[in-house]
């Protein structure tokens, strides 16, 4: 017999149509690309500092970050901030090496009354930070090419920190948003006689 829907009834033991499960994206899943760079770098620098696993070089408070600089950085946490920034850049662009970081963190060499020219930053600082990040397991050498890439562990940590930053930013935005004003009550109209 045929049912009202026009289909034949299913026989006993016949396979039923399986429901296709749609994989839903996790509502709390964030990556490094989902958060502002400044917020992520600040949070990652704090994480690296708290972990106390990065060995700071003895020259960290004396060194200039490039030939074009006049003084050492004022911020005592500059090494952690630079490391966090480098992790982010390697995450976004695998294959980044010391030479690329020298260009990224370079700047104008002032020549007095003569025109300024671009000057690269210190390669030893970039190399030392990459070695420290490699020791922590955040980055690794690319076997078939130049530069470094983020390891699975490094990606997991970056995404976890990015998720924390995104949730904190969402909570701050929700707290800062003004509450919607209640709708005014309709004015009473005088009854017509």
Image (tube, rainbow, N blue to C red):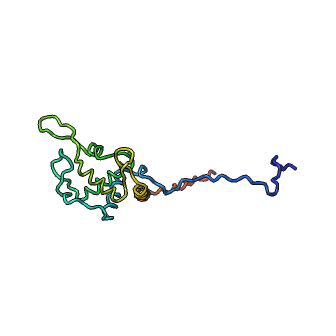
38 with respect to 30 (left or right): left
When the figure is inspected, residue 120 is found, relative to residue 151, above or below; the finding is above
Q: Residue visible at 70% across and 53% down? A: 18
The answer to whether residue 173 of the structure is visible from this angle is no
x, y (%) of residue 23?
A: 58, 53
Nearer to us in this view, 143 or 57: 143
Q: Residue visible at 21% across and 50% down? A: 65
x, y (%) of residue 101?
A: 29, 46
157 with respect to 59 (left or right): right
x, y (%) of residue 28?
A: 49, 57
179 with respect to 25 (left or right): left
Nearer to us in this view, 68 or 193: 68
- Extreme residue toward the top, this view: 115
- Extreme residue toward the front, this view: 144
The answer to whether residue 153 of the structure is visible from this angle is yes
102 with respect to 150 (left or right): left
- Extreme residue toward the left, this view: 113
Q: Residue visible at 32% across and 60% down? A: 48
Q: Count the marks.
A: 0
Q: Residue visible at 22% across and 48% down? A: 122
Q: Find residue 138 and report its image quarter.
A: bottom left
x, y (%) of residue 88?
A: 36, 51
Q: Find residue 118 and report its image quarter.
A: top left
């Amino acid at each position: 017999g045929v049912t009202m829907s026009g289909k034949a009834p299913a026989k006993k033991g016949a396979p039923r149509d399986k429901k296709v499960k749609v994989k839903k994206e996790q509502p709390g899943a964030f990556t490094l690309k989902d958060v502002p760079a400044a917020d992520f770098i600040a949070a990652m620098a704090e994480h690296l500092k708290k972990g106390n696993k990065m060995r700071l070089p003895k020259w960290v408070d004396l060194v200039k970050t490039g030939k074009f600089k006049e003084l050492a950085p004022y911020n005592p946490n500059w090494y952690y901030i630079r490391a966090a920034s480098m992790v982010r850049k390697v995450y976004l662009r695998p294959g980044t090496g010391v030479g690329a970081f020298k260009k990224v963190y370079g700047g104008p060499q002032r020549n007095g009354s003569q025109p300024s020219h671009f000057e690269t930053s210190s390669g030893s600082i970039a190399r030392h930070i990459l070695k420290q990040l490699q020791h922590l397991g955040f980055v690794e050498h690319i076997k078939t090419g130049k530069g470094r890439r983020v390891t699975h562990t490094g990606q997991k940590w970056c995404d976890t920190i990015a998720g924390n930053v995104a949730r904190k930013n969402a909570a701050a935005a929700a707290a800062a948003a003004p509450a919607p004003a209640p709708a005014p009550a309709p004015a009473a109209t005088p009854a017509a006689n």
